[in-house]
């Protein structure tokens, strides 16, 4: 049984020119070149040229959504090379911006609405990691065999739980993914100063969600991102065209997540090979 590997980061830092800068110039905002090299994780096996091209297009869309419209993404053999720039006063801030990109770009960002009807005893909550039919179908997770734990997208290599509440349980059923959404926007509720994601569904997504919620009033529905539960709302009314995703989001997290949802799910899981940062002269 193949393993589901987690992203690995090897930093290769190219640091040029700051030592010769005047002190007052070091306090000014400067442009920094950032190069990020990524590749499919080993567990993905041989990734087709079509999937690599689709992955490149989604990464490019995510960069554009983050306002980095002059960035480029190139496919070189089995790797993706991202070239972009950030504006920062010093190397530490430039590195921070680059690491934020590493958080935003290579993650699959599989958003799922998962059926919890019939499992009230589990009392799932935000932060729990679960196994779903969609994760297995996409090759992002596997159900354990021969008594071995499930494998999936959980942080810290933890095993996702199944419908029996154990790490060897069968997967939960995915009702709908972000493929059923036409838009996602970060919105702030000023009355409680909390950020959330407002989602608009496609015609087919609306039909799926309306049928499920109408048949499961009073039941729980998990909203799951890359295997991790974001929230577990109780279905109080039939949902059709629009809804919101609530969570403990900062503004940056909500805006980045909205961009990731709009740009789609990566066809393959990626790992970071290297990161290079240099001062633009």
Image: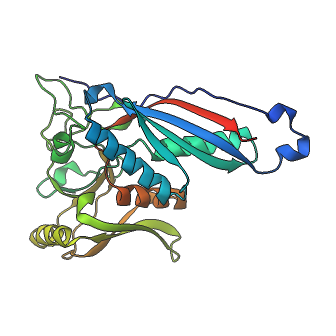
In this image, 155 relative to 92: left or right?
A: left
| Vertical arrangement, residue 148 with respect to residue 244, above or below | above
| Vertical arrangement, residue 17 with respect to residue 253, above or below | above
Residue 98 or 249: which is nearer the viewer? 98
Quarter in which the C terminus is drawn: top right
What residue appears at the point 14 percent right and 67 percent down from the top-left corner? Answer: 208
Residue 107 or 81: which is nearer the viewer? 81
In this image, 281 relative to 166: left or right?
A: right
| Vertical arrangement, residue 112 with respect to residue 55, above or below | below
What residue appears at the point 49 percent right and 67 percent down from the top-left corner? Answer: 194
Please state the horizontal and vertical placement of residue 252, each as a whole percent of the image: 53, 57
State whether residue 156 appears in this view: no
Quarter in which the N terminus is drawn: top left
What residue appears at the point 10 percent right and 22 percent down from the top-left corner? Answer: 146
Residue 224 or 43: which is nearer the viewer? 43
Q: Give the image quarter of residue 38.
A: top left
**Total labels drawn:** 0
Please state the horizontal and vertical placement of residue 4, each as a whole percent of the image: 28, 29
Please state the horizontal and vertical placement of residue 79, each as a whole percent of the image: 40, 32
For the rendered model, the colour scheme is: rainbow
Please state the horizontal and vertical placement of residue 33, each as a whole percent of the image: 64, 41
What residue appears at the point 83 percent right and 31 percent down from the top-left corner? Answer: 19
Residue 163 or 29: which is nearer the viewer? 29
In this image, 208 relative to 96: left or right?
A: left
State whether residue 186 appears in this view: yes
In this image, 265 relative to 272: left or right?
A: left
């Amino acid at each position: 049984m193949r393993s589901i590997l987690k992203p690995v980061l090897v930093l290769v830092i190219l640091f040029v020119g700051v030592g010769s800068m005047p002190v007052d110039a070091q306090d000014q905002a400067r442009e920094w070149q950032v190069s990020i090299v990524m590749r499919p994780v080993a567990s993905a096996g041989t990734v087709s040229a079509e999937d690599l091209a689709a992955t490149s297009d989604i990464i490019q869309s995510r960069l554009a959504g983050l306002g980095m419209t002059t960035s480029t993404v190139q496919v070189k053999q089995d790797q993706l090379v991202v070239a972009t720039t950030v504006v920062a006063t010093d190397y530490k801030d430039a590195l921070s911006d680059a690491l934020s990109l590493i958080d935003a770009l290579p993650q699959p960002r599989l958003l799922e609405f998962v059926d919890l009807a019939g499992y009230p005893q589990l009392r799932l909550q935000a932060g729990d990691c679960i196994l779903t039919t969609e994760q297995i179908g996409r090759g992002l997770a596997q159900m354990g065999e021969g008594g071995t734990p499930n494998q999936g997208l959980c942080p810290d290599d933890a095993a996702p739980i199944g419908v029996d509440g154990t790490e060897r349980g069968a997967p939960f059923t995915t009702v709908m993914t972000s493929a059923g959404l036409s838009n996602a926007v970060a919105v702030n509720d000023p009355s409680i100063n909390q950020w959330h994601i407002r989602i608009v569904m496609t015609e087919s997504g609306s039909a799926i969600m309306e049928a499920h919620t109408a048949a499961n009033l009073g039941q729980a529905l998990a909203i799951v991102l890359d295997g991790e539960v974001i929230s577990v709302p109780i279905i109080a009314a039939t949902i059709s065209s629009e809804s919101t995703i609530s969570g403990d989001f900062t503004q940056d997290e909500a805006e980045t997540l909205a961009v990731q949802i709009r740009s789609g799910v990566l066809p393959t899981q990626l790992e970071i090979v290297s990161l290079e940062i240099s001062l633009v002269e």
